[in-house]
Image (cartoon, rainbow, N blue to C red):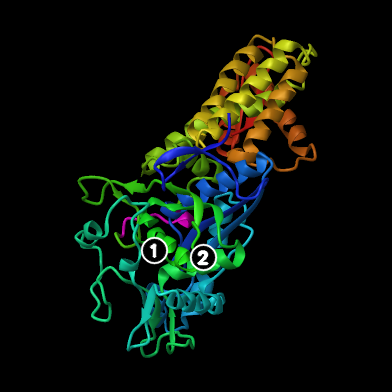
Amino acid sequence: MSLMIHNTLTNSKEEFVTIEPGKVKMYVCGVTVYDDIHMGHARSMIVFDTVARYLRYLGYEVTHVTNFTDVDDKIIIKAAKEGIEPLELSQRYIEKYFEDAAKLGINKADIYPKASECIGDIIDMVQKIIDNGYAYPTEDGSVYFSVRKVENYGRLTKRGLDEMQSSGRIAADEMKKDPMDFAVWKAAKPGEVSWDSPWGKGRPGWHIECSAMIDKYLGEQIDIHGGGNDLIFPHHENEILQTEAVTGKPLSNYWMHNGMLQVKGHGMSKEEKMSKSLGNFFTVKDVAEKFDTSTIRFYFLNTHYMSPLVYGEDMLEEAKAALGRILNNYGDLKSYVKTAPEGDAESDDCCDLIEGYRQAFRDAMDDDFNTRQAIEVLFQMVRATNKSMADKTLSKKAAQRHIALIDEFNGILNIIPEEEEDDGTLDSVMSILIDLRAELRKNKMYNLADMIRDRLGEAGIRLEDSSDGAKWKKV
């Protein structure tokens, strides 16, 4: 089965074929850096981190670019309130972004361009759009894109210009020739951060920065353009117009959009998307104080990326419990190999079983990165190996192969925490405590024996009594 991707442009799954064999150029819209990132941002970050991980697993050479919008009205307003320069404010939140991204287990993108560092490229692109007859400067020094010059606007949303205009989402501006026109360059207001341009001092419009960054770092055409589905209109629609007005070529062959993270509560009768503007957001920093990286990633990846997802701590608790079954099995396998029968891990049955799990996992991921189904493959492994370990029919080498396969899958999902290096001290200490507890139980000092068990549980170590004696594991 070839990798199939749901393409927003065609509203269908299509076989993934790259522009250049073996290479993927992927651009994902980043955040406007004026505050801490929230869990809605986290979903998109984890989704496209996983996409990049899987593409690399398949052997592609991936160039992943994610931008920072560091020049924006929200940044200017907040910086003014704090009495600092806008770029100082945005740099502060860029640094916090990377701190929070680490809490999400995100591999860094290859390039993180900033709008403020691409001004020359943006001005050049605006000038080309004007020269090609698709944009016009105004008296105040702004430049607007003329949408009526384009015949097929609305390719992503499947809506015409008149329908979009009647939606009420278009801001009125007396400088525009048409209400649907949008700014590719904004004239500076007194005291605002600005740069010199052929049309006067100003700053980039929101949409133009992505078009210019893509052209600068990835070229005229890319394989995958990603982002949340709230960016389809107007941001991604307008990106298409700007870029094609310059190149005459499709901007991206595949458009991927993750569903919104929704919140219910705060007096709302129904779910609404998580956003700062609605005031219903939960920051990654705060959530990460209660839940670890693995739980947060599992919570997001246990739903298909296109589906809406409702946020709540109860949902994260459920994710933690479900993930615990995988983590317990993983730990049990590692303990089991110490005493497991040798057996034959190279038998046809064992090889077929391992390869079957691998193929099922790949089939799930090849079906539009269906991490929900891929995780179900892990649960199938959990159920099967738990039974064979209990029956002691799983050989040592077979157990080792299952561990290696879980590690292989985890390289894509990143839902199993890295183990701390152990020099053997913990094993020695636990052996002493287990022997002490056994002696206490032998002498009917159950309160003290239970206290050892409970205190270890509080420290994240679970004791399990069996016919072979007590065993321990980290939880």
Rate crowding at label 1 as few (under 14), some (14 to 19) or many (20 or more) other CA atoms within 10 Å: many
For image coordinates 48% across by 86% down, the residue present is: 197
- Disc 1 marks a residue whose amino acid type is Asn
Q: In the rendered structure, which disc, 2 or 1, sits on the residue that comes first in sequence? A: 1
Q: Main secondary structure of the magenta part?
A: loop
Q: Assign a secondary structure to mark 1.
A: helix
Residue assigned mark 1? 238
Work out whether residue 40 or residue 462 is closer to the camera in this orientation and state it: 40
In the image, residue 171 lies in the stretch drawn in magenta: no
Indicate whether 422 appears above or below 31. Answer: above
Residue 434 visible, this angle: no
Work out whether residue 264 or residue 125 is closer to the camera in this orientation and state it: 125
Residues rendered magenta in the picture: 279-286
Specify whether 211 is left or right of 307: right
- Disc 2 marks a residue whose amino acid type is Thr
Quarter holding the C terminus is: top right
In the image, residue 281 lies in the stretch drawn in magenta: yes
* Residue 374 percent across, percent down from the top left: 54, 30
Q: Do callouts 2 and 1 mark residues in contact (Cβ within 8 Å)?
A: no
Specify whether 325 is left or right of 146: right
Marks 2 and 1 sit apart, C-alpha to C-alpha, by 14 Å
Rate crowding at label 2 as few (under 14), some (14 to 19) or many (20 or more) other CA atoms within 10 Å: some
Residue assigned mark 2? 247
Indicate whether 152 appears above or below 452. Answer: below
Specify whether 166 is left or right of 151: left
* Residue 146 percent across, percent down from the top left: 34, 71
Indicate whether 13 appears above or below 325. Answer: below
For image coordinates 51% across by 72% down, the residue present is: 115
Residue 467 visible, this angle: yes
For image coordinates 31% across by 62% down, the residue present is: 277
Specify whether 19 is left or right of 399: left
* Residue 139 percent across, percent down from the top left: 32, 89
